[in-house]
């Protein structure tokens, strides 16, 4: 199997048709070998439009969802990012390539250990092990926060962790029609929501109902 050709077809046949046209995002995905972030038995599926199992009952998001969230967040090289759910490390790599720094949190220590072996070329990633489903209480603010699994409702704790002008990407609601949105912090106690698309992905482990407000 020609994996470079498969990556090209993924971009042209899955990602571009989903109105993902940001050249920075497209170039980054072309330059980041996704097959290096999956188990050996799944290499030939790395560029398919499917969720892939990564262990502990967790799943890797489809490529078009990863690309769509990157485009929606419009990450700058001065941004600090909090990622909840390191998973395979693939999205972590994409975020770290765009941002100033990434703090990535994973509840399964073994998953993060495997991801770290794939991310040795990045020096701006900070690893944390723990449960970040509804909050990550590190007393820090971030420009961008990404939840890599779905939740029933949006956590006010994460909205509060955004810097002014910061963005939270979250997929929330009930299967099979969950809503992917970007929440922008536009004031001290004010957020706006930009709906992106509907999807249905694996929930974050231990995610609970936590209300949000505007």
Image: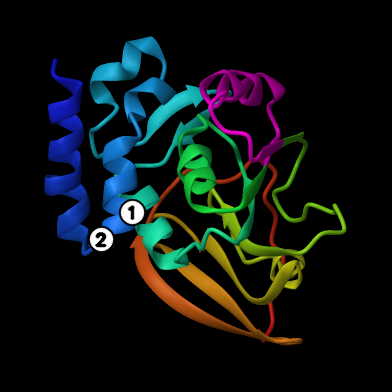
Name the quadrant containing residue 52: top left
Q: How many angstroms separate mark 1 from mark 2 (CA)?
A: 8 Å
- The total of numbered circles placed on residues is 2
135 w.r.t. 35: above or below: below
Question: Earlier along the polypeptide chain: callout 1 or callout 2?
Answer: 2
Pick the quarter of the image with the N terminus.
top left
- Give coordinates of residue 7: x percent, y percent: 21, 33
Q: Which residue in the structure is indicated by mark 1?
A: 25
Q: Secondary structure at mark 1?
A: helix
Image depth: mark 1 or mark 2 in front: 1
Q: Which residues are magenta?
A: 104-126
Q: Which residue in the structure is indicated by mark 2?
A: 20
- Give coordinates of residue 169: x percent, y percent: 53, 62
Residue at 35 percent across and 63 percent down: it is 198
Residue at 69 percent across and 82 percent down: it is 213
How many other residues sit within 10 Å of disc 1, few (<14), some (14-19) or many (≥20)? Answer: many
Do labels 1 and 2 touch, CB within 8 Å?
A: yes
Q: Secondary structure at mark 2?
A: loop
On screen, residue 81 versus residue 181, left or right, reads right
- Give coordinates of residue 156: x percent, y percent: 73, 70
Residue at 23 percent across and 33 percent down: it is 48
Q: Viewer-proximal residue, 45 or 118?
A: 118
Name the quadrant containing residue 6: top left
205 w.r.t. 211: above or below: above
Q: Viewer-proximal residue, 105 or 53?
A: 105
Name the quadrant containing residue 176: bottom left
């Amino acid at each position: 199997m020609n994996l470079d050709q498969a990556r090209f077809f993924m971009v042209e046949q899955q990602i571009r048709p989903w109105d993902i046209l940001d050249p920075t995002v497209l170039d980054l995905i072309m330059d980041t070998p996704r097959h290096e972030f999956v188990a050996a038995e799944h290499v030939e599926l790395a560029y398919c439009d499917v969720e892939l199992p990564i262990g502990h009952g967790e799943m890797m998001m489809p490529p078009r969802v990863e690309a769509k969230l990157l485009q929606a967040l419009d990450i700058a090289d001065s941004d600090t990012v909090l990622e909840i759910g390191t998973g395979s490390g693939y999205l972590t790599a994409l975020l770290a390539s765009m941002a100033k720094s990434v703090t990535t949190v994973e509840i399964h220590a073994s998953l993060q250990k495997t991801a770290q072996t794939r991310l040795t070329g990045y020096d701006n990633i900070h690893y944390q092990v723990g449960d970040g489903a509804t909050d990550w209480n590190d007393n820090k603010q971030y420009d961008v926060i990404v939840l890599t699994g779905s939740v029933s409702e949006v956590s006010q704790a994460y909205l509060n962790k955004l810097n002014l002008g910061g963005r939270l990407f979250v997929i929330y609601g009930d299967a099979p029609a969950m809503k992917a949105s970007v929440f922008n912090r536009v004031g001290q106690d004010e957020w706006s929501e930009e709906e992106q698309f509907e999807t249905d992905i694996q929930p974050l482990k231990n995610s609970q109902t936590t209300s949000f407000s505007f």
